[in-house]
Image: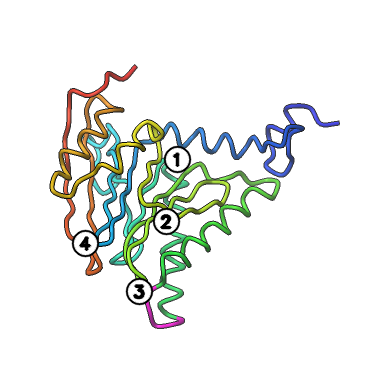
Amino acid sequence: MFSKDDYDITPTVYSPDGRIFQVEYAREAIKRGALGIGVRSPEWVVLASLRPEEGRLIEKEYVKKQYFITRRIVAITSGLIADGRILVDILRERAQEEWLTYGEEATISSLVKWLCRICELYTRFEGIRPFGAALLIGGFDATGPHLYDVDPSGVGREVKAWAIGRGSEEVLPELEKIDMQKLKEDIRKIFKMVYEKGVVDVIVLSKEGVISQEEIRFSGGRKEG
């Protein structure tokens, strides 16, 4: 018979009530990560992520949570930073392989399927653990604009708008209200729902590539306790 600890330390065994604790713990790590949001429309994709507080002491490129996969595809991460970077590297390598093999840009759906397969494998073998990071992957390919959410269990979903990290469930209803004419104000409002102050890195993509990249600073939001 397995004890509770046996169910707790391996991702290869279900608990009696059908749970895989290691996957649940990975999701908890994501909830402790910085908030990131994504919104998709027929003309553009917006990705925004909170820069960690220690970013004031570290060069910006080392604390940003936004990563170019191709010139028209960007990923943002939340959760364990090192795990997120490994997943980003997997996406980049796959995109390069498809370009070298087929001579054309990879579709976002093919990249997401590849990444989900790898994430799922990390829930089925002893001696490894699920990745403690979630990704939002957005941008344009030959089929148009896309935005996907990928979680540690290996589930990837195409979404119109989504949030990952701290306070994500709280801000989801606000994402549908984002107006491109008031982009800065709307994003600032969303992050103030969760944080007292901070800096948000925002990137806007169109079918041509990056429209804009900028910082949005805010203060006077919720007190962190």
Mark 4 or mark 2, whichever is nearer to me: 4
Q: Earlier in the sequence, mark 4 or mark 1?
A: 1
Q: Who comes first in sequence, dot 2 or dot 1?
A: 1
In the image shown, does 88 or 221 lie closer to the viewer? Answer: 221
What's the residue type where badge 4 is placed?
Val
Determine the secondary structure under disc 3: loop
Q: What is the C-alpha distance between the residues marked 2 and 1?
A: 12 Å
The span picked out in magenta is 101-105
The residue where tag 1 is placed is: 80
Q: CA distance from mark 1 to mark 3?
A: 32 Å
User: Is residue 194 a member of the stretch shown in magenta?
Assistant: no
Circle 2 SS class: helix
Query: Which residue is label 3 attached to?
Result: 142
Q: Which residue is mark 4?
A: 210
Give the residue at x 44% y 45%.
82
Q: Name the amino acid, label 3.
A: Ala
Residue 134 image point, x, y percent: 46, 45
Taking the image as shown, residue 43 lies to the left or right of residue 127, namely left
The Cα atoms of the two marked residues, 4 and 3, are separated by 16 Å
Q: Amino acid at mark 2?
A: Val
Which mark is on residue 88?
A: 2
Cα–Cα gap, marks 4 and 1? 26 Å
Looking at the image, is mark 1 or mark 3 nearer the viewer? 3
**Height in image: 156 above or below 81?**
below
Name the one closer to the observer, 146 or 128.
Answer: 146
